[in-house]
Image (spheres, rainbow, N blue to C red):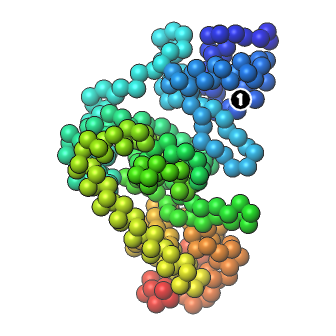
């Protein structure tokens, strides 16, 4: 294939990304173009709102760039690559407002303030196993889950271990802290199930906090609840035995609470690895603990599915 240039190369990139996310080097190889040419086009298309850098993936399996939802249709039907208008129609704004009302940080806000938030929000869909962002990276904004499931976690790369901080399901929001302190992401986020998220850009939210006192007050109240969760989690991880932690995680599926295992009620079926990452221990330890619980009649395990038989017994272990 001859080397492509200019808009022809941009259009070729769009057509290739329509097939799925792709790294810069893979695009250069597929299109028989120089990486520098591809990088220039990608920068332009990113600025135009047609593509964006896909969230990080673990290890060396880099996902690279992906097409912004609806961008392919807009480019094919409206001509050469151009900035795709991000404005939502009135029905779209109203639907977004209804969704924000169900999210804890925004439940007390007026429709006028919710509309301002909806106007800056961007909606994206992510696939399972995508890393939405990494701890320490620059904050893109805060997120609201419309559908799906997201895992927030801390990672010790030297030890190869991870701690699940919380599972976030529909109407949950996360990554609010950097909005206030201008710092990096405090945790990493992984997509567990196909998820549709609202992204509220950091700069826009900071401006709205200045303009809307009721949003400022609501945010403080919500952050206070998150502090309580973190303090309970510190207590659970430092002062409870592994047996008690596993029992609490199992009980979270039927009686959601703060602390270790929070959000596990959003998951239809927890694996032993997931329980271990919540409990801050090894999978083998969780396997042995579950066997003990089963022998004692507190739970039943069938082909990896855990059924709670005696909640009171698990409660007594905490």
Snapshot quadrant of residue 41? top right
Q: Is residue 167 left or right of residue 28?
A: left
Q: Percent from the top left, x then y, of residue 14?
A: 61, 20
Residue at the disc numbered 1: 24
Q: Percent from the top left, x then y, of residue 312?
A: 43, 87
Q: Percent from the top left, x then y, of residue 315?
A: 45, 85
Snapshot quadrant of residue 200? top left
Residue 252 visible in the displayed image:
no
- Residue ID at (58%, 47%): 137
Q: Nearer the viewer, residue 88 or 289?
A: 88
How many numbered discs?
A: 1
For residue 304, above or below residue 49: below
Q: Percent from the top left, x then y, of residue 282?
A: 69, 74
For residue 286, above or below residue 36: below
Q: Is residue 20 left or right of residue 257?
A: right
Q: Secondary structure at mark 1?
A: helix
């Amino acid at each position: 294939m001859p080397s492509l240039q200019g808009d022809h190369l941009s259009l070729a990139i769009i057509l290739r990304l329509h097939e799925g996310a792709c790294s810069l080097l893979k695009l250069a190889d597929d299109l028989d173009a120089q990486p520098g040419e591809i990088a220039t086009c990608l920068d332009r298309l990113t600025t135009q709102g047609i593509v964006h850098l896909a969230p990080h993936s673990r290890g060396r399996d880099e996902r690279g760039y992906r097409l912004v939802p609806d961008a392919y249709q807009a480019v094919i039907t409206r001509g050469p690559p151009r900035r795709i208008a991000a404005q939502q129609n009135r029905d779209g704004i109203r639907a977004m407002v209804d969704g924000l009302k169900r999210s804890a940080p925004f439940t007390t806000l007026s429709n006028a303030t919710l509309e301002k938030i909806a106007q800056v929000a961007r909606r994206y869909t992510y696939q399972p196993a995508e890393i939405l962002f990494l701890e320490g990276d620059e904050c893109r904004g805060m997120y609201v889950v419309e559908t799906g499931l997201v895992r927030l976690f801390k990672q010790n790369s030297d030890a190869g271990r991870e701690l699940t901080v919380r599972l976030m399901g529909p109407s949950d929001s996360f990554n609010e802290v950097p909005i206030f302190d201008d710092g990096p992401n405090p945790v990493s986020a992984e997509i567990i199930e196909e998820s549709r998220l609202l992204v509220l850009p950091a700069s826009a939210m900071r401006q709205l906090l200045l303009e809307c006192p009721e949003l400022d007050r609501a945010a403080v109240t919500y952050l206070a609840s998150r502090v309580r969760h973190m303090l309970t989690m510190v207590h659970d991880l430092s002062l409870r035995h592994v047996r008690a932690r596993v029992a609490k995680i199992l009980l979270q599926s039927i009686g959601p609470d703060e602390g270790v295992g929070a959000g596990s009620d959003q998951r239809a079926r927890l694996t032993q690895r997931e329980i271990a990452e919540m409990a801050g221990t090894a999978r083998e330890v969780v396997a042995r603990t579950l066997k003990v619980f089963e022998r004692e009649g507190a739970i039943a395990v069938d082909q990896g599915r855990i059924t709670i038989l005696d909640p009171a017994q698990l409660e007594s272990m905490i």
